[in-house]
Image: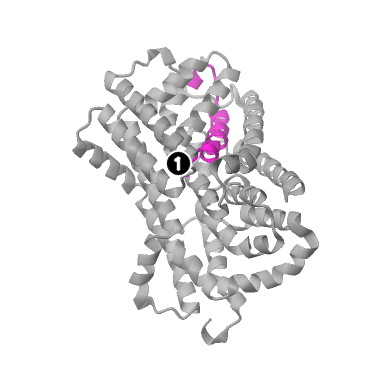
Amino acid sequence: MIFNLPPILGLTPLIVYIILAFRPNIHPLANVVICMIIGAVLTGTNLLEFGSILTTSLGSFLGQVGFIIMIGSGLGLILKESGVAENLVHLLIRKIGINSIGRAIIASMLASMFMVLVLSTLTGGNAVLAPILIPLVASVGMTPSTLAIIMQTAGVTGLFISPFSPPMVTIMELTGMAYQEVLLYASLPVCIPMWVITYFNAKHVQKQTAGVADYPEGTALSADDYKPSADARRATAWFGVAMVLVVAYGVVNSLGVAHAITVITVAVLATGFGARYKIDKIIDLFMKGCAQYFWLYIMFILMDPFLNFIAASGAFDALVEIGSPLVEGGGKVGLAMLAALIGTFGIQGAAVAQAVMLDTVFRPLVDATGLSMAVWALVILIGSQMTSFAYPGLDMVAATGTARSADMKSQVKHGWIITAVTLLVCLIESLLLA
């Protein structure tokens, strides 16, 4: 630290990051740049060496995750333009058959979860899904308020069960656990209550809003009216076969971050060739889709030195010294709940960045107390993902808007229920497995 300042002041960039993250007019990338510069100044880092610092960051774990998110967006655009996304949704809807509110809720939950799982992005998956799904659920009278709840909650569970989504890749890398273990100890304990709560609360909200805030007249359409083109059917088949084979290979061989890049690349090529696109068109669509999340890729690259500067200041070591007496009083369970609560209510930002911050801050205490990696995986998942339910942040607002709803009150109430129940799940698993 410059001027021999106390190491604990090295947390200043993190505190500033959290404060700015709650400001609506600060772009996340600008936030990280500001905090990275503060960290560099506090540690006396020569900013003229910034090029070499970024070179290292390009190969970091955060850089890899940012790259995966970016190329996943490229795949998403190809799936949309080729008609594969629309065809998959209609195939699912026809299998279930929407002829009642109950079935419409189940169909919407599965469709949102599946689309987010395939595209590995909550906002992007629901944005592709909405124009297809809204006319179908409107045919049985589902309201925008009901669909908004479904899109945020059921949609996000798609990220929790996908073996190569950014949250899952991050948790596997941070904990060293295999996909099957993360699924068993973290994903399913969170997803199962989220599915149950979403189904019953969606029915409750539907009763409250039916006839009060319906979709405009003329919105409803039947799934039977949809006829996919031959190219869309062929591309869907190619995409499906490629995904099953490549994902299965990765799960069987316990492959990690690098395989996510392989999965997306194979899916892009399979879908493009299945749709009979020329290679030039595949590349153009892919790059156009990547461009939508290029800023996020840069942010993740800059996030690595941002966290490294804090670590170099000795702030995390100082935090361990301060927190040790508190942890000794609460034990492993106290540590798990403290980390989950701070992650949920105290750290705001991109979920993957939240997960890495949470692990960076608390990992010394986790190792010192011998907290189970199974419990720590659950803590990271809850601490990084429940923020969007505890506060009306970007994901909640995006889901509300995508469903064409203006009912934030129902959305916030639902988010609080989800947050409370998942924290209860964290407490129970900590008591059993910590």
Amino acid type shown at disc 1: Thr
Relative to 152, residue 95 above or below: above
Residue lying farthest front? 253
Examine the image and state in which quarter residue 345 appears: bottom right
Judged from this view, the residue extending furthest toward the bottom is: 3
State which quadrant residue 209 falls in: top right
Residue 307 appears in the picture as rendered: yes
* Left or right placement of residue 269 versus residue 404 in this view: left
In x, y percent, where is residue 1? Answer: 53, 81
Q: Is residue 70 magenta?
A: no
Main secondary structure along the magenta-highlighted residues: helix
Residue under the point 65% across and 48% down: 374
86 to the left or right of 212: left
Residue 6 percent coordinates (x, y): 61, 81
Q: Residue at x 62, y 58 (%)?
A: 346
Q: Is residue 230 above or below residue 9?
A: above
Expressed as whole percent of the image width and height from the top left, the position of residue 33 reads 42, 66
* Camera-side residue of 378 and 369: 369
* SS at mark 1 in the image: loop
Q: Which residue is mark 1?
A: 121
Residue 137 inside the magenta-drawn segment: yes
The residue lying at 75 percent from left, 44 percent from top is 428
Q: Nearer the viewer, residue 96 or 184?
A: 184
* Residue range corresponding to the magenta coloring: 136-165
- Can you say whether 79 is above or below 370 in the image? above
Left/right placement of residue 267 relative to residue 178 reads: left
Question: x and y percent of residue 51 in the render?
Answer: 33, 70
Residue at figure coordinates x 38%, y 70% from the top left: 53
